[in-house]
Image: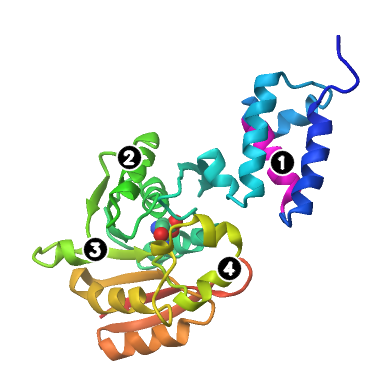
Amino acid sequence: MKRPDDWTILKLLQWTTTYFKEHDIESARIDAELLLAFALGLERIDLYLRYDQPLNPDELTRFRTMVKRRVAREPVAYILGAKEFWELEMAVGPEVLIPRPETECLVEAVLDFLKNENGPEAPRFLDLGTGSGAIAMALARSCPTARVVALDRSCAALALADRNRRRHHLEDRVDLVAGDWLAPFSDTRARFDVVVSNPPYISSGQIDGLQPEIVRYEPRAALDGGPDGLDCLALIIGAAPALLSPGGAVFLEIGHDQFPAVQRLAHESGVYRDVACRPDYSGMDRVACLVRH
Ligand code: GLN
């Protein structure tokens, strides 16, 4: 028999939402739902059909542990160990940046470029700093004939990217390479149609001012782009042309105010014929596209 003081799904959602709000967590209700659904092994939508269902002690303990982690401002994606990107579920952990919706604009820009340029039958992509492998998997999934090389210097990140590669059955078309930016290719004749990257592009001094979720939990190496945030962007813009086939392009995710600097860097290198920028869903400059002569 149900006692009136039982913690039902509805009561827990209400309590947790208030508790999260008190701790300045913006998406309080959604986070409560995501965590509770996960603790119960349900889809979020199922919660609504079971509002009166009480939790058993095990479920309650599991949920409490997750609530504590969230109140310490750990991102939901790390607690769940997963984040959706490009409609693919990606395994994530503290060793990689959580894939962001804005980064889907980068994937979109690459796909549009191939379509408009009448790109090669079987395009070759290089994803620099692949992290969870989100960009690499999204591109491989969207271009069934493409081959992707995904590189990261962190072996922990590559292990996670490998999990995502297997999860989405892309082992035969996505190669994972350990290395520092373009160094592994310096002695090779490898050529790519597109080099893509969401590199660290936040200036070092700004990182500590970001949300606690980011500052405390996401890998600093995936965020920190040096004094002006441009270190990795400059490196890629300078070195990528040697690996691009003629007419190939570099696609970079950038900060909202970095496009003028990217234009300058591209101009200085003297090897790009076309430099353009695309906004993200909130209208901010987000993706730079540099086409090689
Ligand atoms: N390429 C990965 C992503 O876009 C990781 C990016 C990074 O760590 N800066 O999610």
Residue wearing tag 2? 170
Q: Amino acid at mark 3?
A: Asp
Sequence order check: which comes first, mark 4 or mark 3? 3
Name the mark nearer the viewer: 1 or 2. 1
Amino acid of disc 4: Leu
Q: State the predominant SS element of the stretch in magenta.
A: helix
Secondary structure at badge 3 equals: loop
Alpha carbon of mark 4 to alpha carbon of mark 3: how far? 26 Å
- Ligand 1 visible in quadrant: bottom left
Residue at the image position 58 percent from the left and 68 percent from the top: 210
| Dot 1 or dot 4, earlier in sequence | 1
Instruction: Give the foreground label among 3 and 2.
Output: 3
Q: Secondary structure at mark 1?
A: helix
Query: Which one is closest to the eye, mark 4 or mark 3?
Result: 4
- Mark 4 sits near ligand 1, with its Cβ under 8 Å away: no
Residue drawn at 31 percent across, 43 percent down: 159
Tag on residue 210?
Answer: 4
Magenta span: 27-38
Work out whether residue 115 can be spotted: no
Q: Is residue 45 above or below residue 224?
A: above
Q: Give the residue drawn at x 40%, y 83%.
A: 262
Q: Position of residue 214 (x, y in %)?
A: 54, 60
Question: Which comes before the other along the chain, label 3 or label 1?
Answer: 1
Instruction: Give the CA separation, mark 1 to mark 2.
Output: 33 Å
Q: Residue furthest top?
A: 1
Mark 3 and mark 1: span between their CA atoms? 39 Å
Question: Is the C-beta separation of discs 1 and 2 under 8 Å?
Answer: no
Q: Amino acid at mark 2?
A: Leu
Q: Which mark is residue 32?
A: 1
Q: CA distance from mark 3 to mark 2?
A: 23 Å
